[in-house]
Image (cartoon, rainbow, N blue to C red):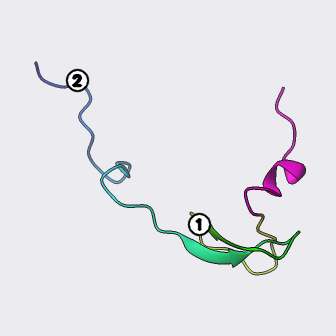
């Protein structure tokens, strides 16, 4: 059976390996890796510190 919505075009990121960037946590100073390029002037948080800075979801 033919796939109804084939994966193609610029939105199929599943074929590409994720690129990680080295960063330093803005809270504890621990080295970490993030799946985006950090922007200068904006803090990056490690997995341990991130929940403290996230807004609660309702």
Give residue 50's mark.
Answer: none
Contact between marks 1 and 2 (CB within 8 A): the answer is no
Q: What is the quadrant of the N terminus in the image?
A: top left
For disc 1, the marked residue is 36
Q: CA distance from mark 1 to mark 2?
A: 32 Å
Residue, x 59% and y 66% (percent of image)? 36
Q: Secondary structure at mark 1?
A: loop
Q: Position of residue 12 (x, y in %)?
A: 34, 48
Give the secondary structure at mark 2. loop
- Relative to residue 36, is residue 4 depicted above or below? above
Residue stretch in magenta: 46-58
From the image, which quarter does the C terminus lie in? top right
Q: Which mark is residue 4?
A: 2
Secondary structure mainly formed by the magenta segment = loop
Question: What percent of the width, then of the height, locates residue 27?
Answer: 88, 69
Residue 49 vertical position relative to residue 29 in the rendered view, above or below: above
User: Along the line of sight, which residue is nearer the eye, 22 or 15?
Assistant: 22
Position in image of residue 54 (x %, y %) = 84, 47
- For the point 84% across and 72% down, the residue is 26
- Classify residue 7 as left or right of residue 34: left
Q: Position of residue 37 (x, y in %)?
A: 60, 73
Residue 12 relative to residue 57: left or right:
left
């Amino acid at each position: 059976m033919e796939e109804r919505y084939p994966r193609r075009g610029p939105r199929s990121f599943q074929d590409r390996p994720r690129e990680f960037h080295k960063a330093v946590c803005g809270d504890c100073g621990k080295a970490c890796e993030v799946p985006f390029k950090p922007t200068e002037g904006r803090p990056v948080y490690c997995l341990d510190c991130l929940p403290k800075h996230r807004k609660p979801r309702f």
